[in-house]
Image (cartoon, rainbow, N blue to C red):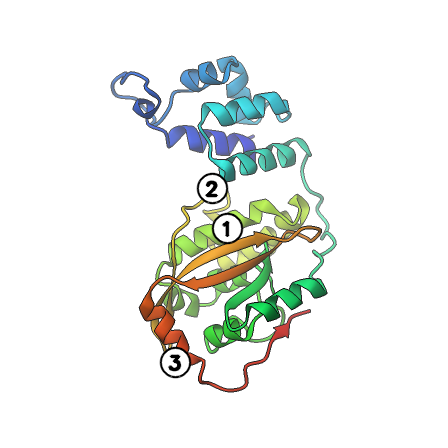
Amino acid sequence: MSTPLGDFIRAKRDSIQPESFGLPDRGRRRSPGLRRSDLATRAGISVEYLTRIEQGRDRNPSPAVVNALADALSLDAAERNHLRHLAKITGGGCPGRGRPVPPNRHVRPTVLETLQLLEPGIAFVTNRLGDVLAYTTEFELLMRGIGLLEGGTPNLTRYVFTDPRARTFFPDWEQVADERAFDLWLGPSAETSEWFRAELAPLAGKEFTRRLNRHLPPPHVPLRLNHPIAHELRWQREKLELPRTDAQELVVLLPADDATARAMKRLRRQPDRILRAVN
């Protein structure tokens, strides 16, 4: 039975061209990417041991082996963090069947004060499940009328996969969907993420479930929005991990071009802009 750790290593290995590592071209192969034997040699482990890890028959590789595999695959910082996370949850066993305690959705007062300081910028606090926990007035203005902030606790992941309006609002819907599914691997905990995936899967369908075993981090690209009034907007995203929270982060959207900046200036003329924290 495969494991998230084994799936990630195999997917990353399949994505690497041997020539990029200075290895010779050995002709046509039944599967693409780096050979298992080549990866094992680079990591200093046996092919048999690597096979056991990839197939889920060894669930507890040592930190030294995990680091050696990260080096052998030339992982970047984000991929290394993901590999260590997968090693932790793979070795920890399967999550329980009951619903875990929900993540703490409380936003610290100092974080809310930070949001105030960011006005009139566009910023919000979220967690890895996609809950939108607090936001600036400019974020509310940007998201007004698309369905995300309507009723209950807004959740970006649920919105992307279950609200038909999301496909219009996000022109690069496939990219956004990949990002939301990948973030579920990063917390708040393995148990909570597993519960959320199980809850969302029947509603979201195959577009969600086929992404669940993808472990390669999506590329970091500008976010495009098809706004109902301002039309196409392009944003750069900066993310700040918040310490001592349940995988919460502060996300700031910055205009990626002059046209987006001018469009937001026009939207700011609308009244009733109030900073809200969602509890």
The amino acid type found where label 2 is placed reads: Arg
The answer to whether marks 2 and 3 mark residues whose Cβ atoms lie closer than 8 Å is: no
Q: Is residue 238 above or below residue 217?
A: below
> How many numbered dots are placed on residues in this image?
3
Q: Is residue 107 visible?
A: no
Report x, y in % for residue 140.
Answer: 52, 74
Report x, y in % for residue 200.
Answer: 56, 57
Q: Check disc 1 and report its element: helix, strand or loop.
A: helix
Q: Earlier in the sequence, mark 2 or mark 3?
A: 2
Q: Nearer the viewer, mark 3 or mark 1?
A: 3
The answer to whether marks 2 and 1 mark residues whose Cβ atoms lie closer than 8 Å is: yes
Count residues near mark 3 (Cα–Cα under 10 Å), then give few for <14, some for 14-19, many for 20+. few
The span from disc 3 to disc 1 (Cα, nearest Å) is: 33 Å
Q: Is residue 27 above or below residue 211?
A: above
Quarter of the image with the N terminus in it: top right
Q: Is residue 154 above or below residue 266?
A: above
Q: Which residue is mark 1?
A: 181
Q: Check disc 2 and report its element: helix, strand or loop.
A: loop
Q: Which residue is mark 2?
A: 214
Question: Residue at left 46%, top 32%?
Answer: 75
The amino acid type found where label 3 is placed reads: Arg
The answer to whether marks 3 and 1 mark residues whose Cβ atoms lie closer than 8 Å is: no
Q: Spot the residue most to the bottom.
A: 271
Question: Residue at left 47%, top 63%?
Answer: 253
The amino acid type found where label 1 is placed reads: Ala
Report x, y in % for residue 251.
Answer: 53, 59
Residue nearest the viewer, comparing 192 with 110: 110
Residue nearest the viewer, comparing 122 with 205: 122
Q: Earlier in the sequence, mark 2 or mark 1?
A: 1
Residue 279, by quadrant, is: bottom right
Q: Nearer the viewer, mark 2 or mark 3?
A: 3
Q: Which residue is mark 3?
A: 266
